[in-house]
C-alpha cells in the first residue's frame, strides 16, 4: 500500500505559503503533483498546479492574496503508481483587500469597457459569462495590472462581469 505524502506548512505570510512534502515509506518517489485551490468571490474556484520532481521537496508559492483560505492537495508519483491524495489548509496572514467597485459599459455590440477602483501594483482578474452557472464553472477571463480593460464579447448576448 502506498501512503499519501505528508504536507507540512513551514511558514506563510500575506502573499506566500512555504510547505514541505515527504513520504513515510521506502517506496521510491519520482515526484509530486500539487494543486492549490482558493475561492474567488464565492463564484469561482481557482487552481494552480505544480509538478515537482524528486523525493523530498520544499516549495514556496507566491503571488497569493492576504487573509484568504487556501487548500493544498498533493499526491506522489512512485515506482508502484500514484499515492492517495493528502490535504493541508492554511489562511494567509494580513488583511484581505477590499473588493473592487466595477463599472461595465457597452462601447458597441461586441465590446465592453470595464473599469474599477482598487489598489495599485496588483494583478486583477476579469471574469465574464452569459449566465451565473457559466460564470462559476467556465467563465471567459483575462488579467491586467491596470484599472480598465476592453473586453470583446459576442453580439446579441447579455454578460455578467466580475473583477
Image (spheres, helix red, strand yellow):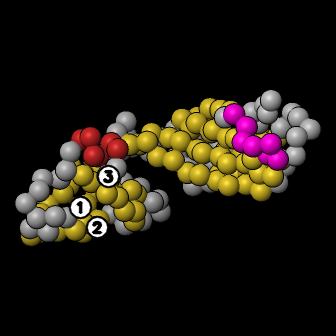
> Residue 126: horizontal and vertical position, in percent?
33, 57
Q: Residues within 10 Å of mark 3 (few under 14, many from 20)?
A: many
The first of marks 1 and 3 along the sequence is 1
Name the residue furthest right.
26
Determine which quarter of the picture holds residue 123.
Answer: bottom left
Residue highlighted by disc 3: 139
Up-down: is 66 above or below 139? above
Which secondary structure, mark 3? Answer: loop
Residue highlighted by disc 2: 149
Of tags 1 and 3, the one toward the viewer is 3
Q: Which residues are magenta?
A: 78-84
Q: CA distance from mark 2 to mark 1?
A: 5 Å
Which residue is depicted at the point 32% across and 52% down? 139
Which secondary structure, mark 1? Answer: strand
> Residue 90: horizontal and vertical position, in percent?
62, 34
Which residue is depicted at the point 40% across and 62% down? 143
Mark 2 in CB contact with mark 1 (< 8 angstroms)? yes
Q: CA distance from mark 1 to mark 3?
A: 16 Å
Residue highlighted by disc 1: 114
Name the residue furthest front.
80
Which residue is depicted at the point 51% across and 47% down? 47
Q: Nearer the viewer, residue 148 or 73?
A: 73
Q: Nearer the viewer, residue 137 or 111?
A: 137
Amino acid at each position: 500500500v502506498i501512503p499519501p505524502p505528508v504536507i507540512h506548512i513551514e511558514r506563510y505570510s500575506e502573499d506566500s505559503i512555504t510547505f514541505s512534502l515527504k513520504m513515510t515509506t521506502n517506496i521510491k518517489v519520482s515526484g509530486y503533483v500539487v494543486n492549490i485551490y482558493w475561492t474567488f468571490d464565492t463564484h469561482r474556484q481557482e487552481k494552480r498546479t505544480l509538478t515537482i520532481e524528486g523525493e523530498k521537496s520544499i516549495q514556496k508559492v507566491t503571488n497569493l492574496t492576504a487573509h484568504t483560505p487556501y487548500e493544498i492537495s498533493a499526491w506522489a508519483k512512485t515506482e508502484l503508481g500514484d499515492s492517495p491524495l493528502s490535504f493541508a489548509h492554511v489562511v494567509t496572514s494580513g488583511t484581505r483587500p477590499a473588493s473592487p467597485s466595477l463599472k461595465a459599459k457597452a462601447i458597441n455590440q461586441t465590446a465592453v469597457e470595464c473599469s474599477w477602483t482598487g489598489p495599485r501594483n496588483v494583478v486583477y482578474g476579469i471574469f465574464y459569462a452569459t449566465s451565473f452557472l457559466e460564470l462559476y464553472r467556465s467563465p471567459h477571463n483575462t488579467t491586467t495590472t491596470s484599472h480598465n480593460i476592453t473586453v470583446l464579447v459576442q453580439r446579441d448576448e447579455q454578460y455578467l462581469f466580475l473583477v
